Image: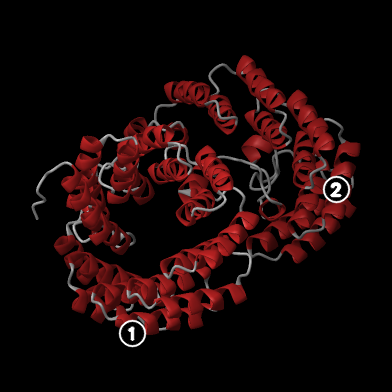
Amino acid sequence: MKGFISRCRVFLVGVFSLLSFLSLSLPSPAEEGSPIDRGLEGFASEKAEGYYYFVLAQMLLKSGDIDGAIKYYKEAIEKDPNSPTMYTDLAHLYIKKGNTVLGENYLHKAIDIEPEYYPAHMLLAELYRVMKRDEEAVKMYRKAISLKPDNERPYIHLSTLYARMKDYDSAVAVLKELIERKPESTIAYYYLGRLESERGRYNKASLYLQKALDLSPSFTAVYLELGLVYELAKRLEDAIEVYRKVLEYLPNDTGVMNRIGTLLIQLNRYDEAISQYEKLEEFDSTRLDAMVKIGLIYFEQKRYDESISKFREILDINPDLHRIRYYLGTAYEEKGEFDRAEEEFKKIPSDDKSFIDSKIHLAYIYEKQGRVDDTVRTIRDVIRLKGGDPELYRLLASVYREAKRYDEAIDTMKEALQLFPDDAELHFLLGVLYDDVDRDEECIEEMLKVIELNPLHANALNYIGYTYAEMGIRLDEAEEYIKRALEIKPNSGHIIDSLGWVYYKKGEFEKAVTELEKALQYLPDDPVVVEHLGDAYLELSYKEKAMDAYERAHRLDPDNTALKTKLERLKKELNLEYEE
């Protein structure tokens, strides 16, 4: 989007960099009164020999010889030392060469000769603006306005300068001054719209821009700015309508067509977006880009066969587009054709930007296929190539954990923490791994490190509290940790369950039931929460409720033998026969 917005912004004069300023051509004769290309007009009183050197300078300028032109301008000035035009033109040449000091000096000489000479004031104002001598620039623009009050250019440049100075009120005032002078000034309303947009006042901006369009209905730059304003205001439908209006004047503007496609995607109007990009396929300059976007839209819609077909079509045109091959592999992966996905990912060369991403996808494929060793080897390759990445170590440890290779998972985390000792998430995962193997003290030690690094880590706070509760120790501290976690995540069913379990361990069974029933609203299918609630009911002698909770938990977790035993015992107490 940035590139498109920038293109919109440069349709008219904005704030130039010094480099762009130095490359400006001399002011146009119609606007600034320069002698260039106007022959002898205005030179009747100037010495013929001076004009001769001026003509020679023009000939050299046309051939690109600025140094030669400067030489002949100086000859012309020697013959005609009272010409402000010569001094102004010479100043412009020096500025183009980057010699702003001499440029400024010659402009002052032009003004000394003729204090009311507009081109010199205007060029000096531009020079001061680019050099960020803002107050002097304002003064020169004001002088230029006083000399040619019907010329729009100095108003626009002065307003732009004020905007750069963040003096928006003055910037608006200058443009309104221009409108008062020239009520039909399209450019004034256009820049008012831009100013209000820059200030985030999108409704005002759109009104000014619409006024500009009322004055000049075919001014496409205004449509582009209005479309941008609508985008910033999240009025995407209106933006699309405006951009389509641009295409009535510029039917082959691929940038605008592409923008419409992008907005249609944002609105999830995928079929319309595809139609838009199919139009762009007709242009050689945008064909491949349009095909890529169509393929990605198909992918987003889970139309994997069509996505694959489009990506293959692109690779038939250019087989070296490795990012497209990466997309192709990903489409096969999503479709569940892992062998074909692996084949495409392996074709991506190691020096391509997509190589590491393709290796990560290969690791996921191997994991889904249960190829643990291949997964580990691939992740290790990526770690070596990327020079270490905490996320990759977490991924590797998770692979080991899934395979119940806990010692290797723990060793991986320790290796990662040698490189990233202050990574809270690494410490957290190591703590979880210690919990997996019932190393409770080490689990708590790691969780305390997590909190030291990130005091707002709700999961670590909860882990400590719940672990203390499970161990039956430091229950007041456990309650405090869990309540801190709830302040951060008040709607977490797991943390609410932990609080209920602490109350249970403390013998506060009514409180336990209250919290556990609340947790069940968030986690209705969590067998642990349901079993905890059954335990709390049982302590309060709500045996029927406890029975219902245990049976529900057993249905959710039929392999839990301890729960099964608990259920059988309660049924015996109620003289019920347990049925498998």
Q: Is residue 440 left or right of residue 378?
A: right
Q: Residues within 10 Å of mark 1 (few under 14, many from 20)?
A: some
- The answer to whether residue 304 is seen in the rendering is yes
> On screen, 444 above or below 419?
above
Q: Quadrant of residue 152?
A: top right
Q: Quadrant of residue 159?
A: top right
Q: Nearer the viewer, residue 46 or 470?
A: 470
Could you say where residue 104 lies in the image, as x and y percent from the top left? 85, 48
Quarter of the image containing the C terminus? bottom left
Query: What colour scheme does the image use?
Result: secondary structure
**SS class, disc 1:** helix
Q: Residue at x 64, y 23 (%)?
A: 175
Could you say where residue 517 lies in the image, as x and y percent from the top left? 33, 35
Could you say where residue 255 lies in the image, as x and y percent from the top left? 38, 49
**SS class, disc 2:** helix
Which is nearer the N-term, disc 2 or disc 1? 2
The amino acid marked with disc number 1 is Asp
Residue under circle 2? 104
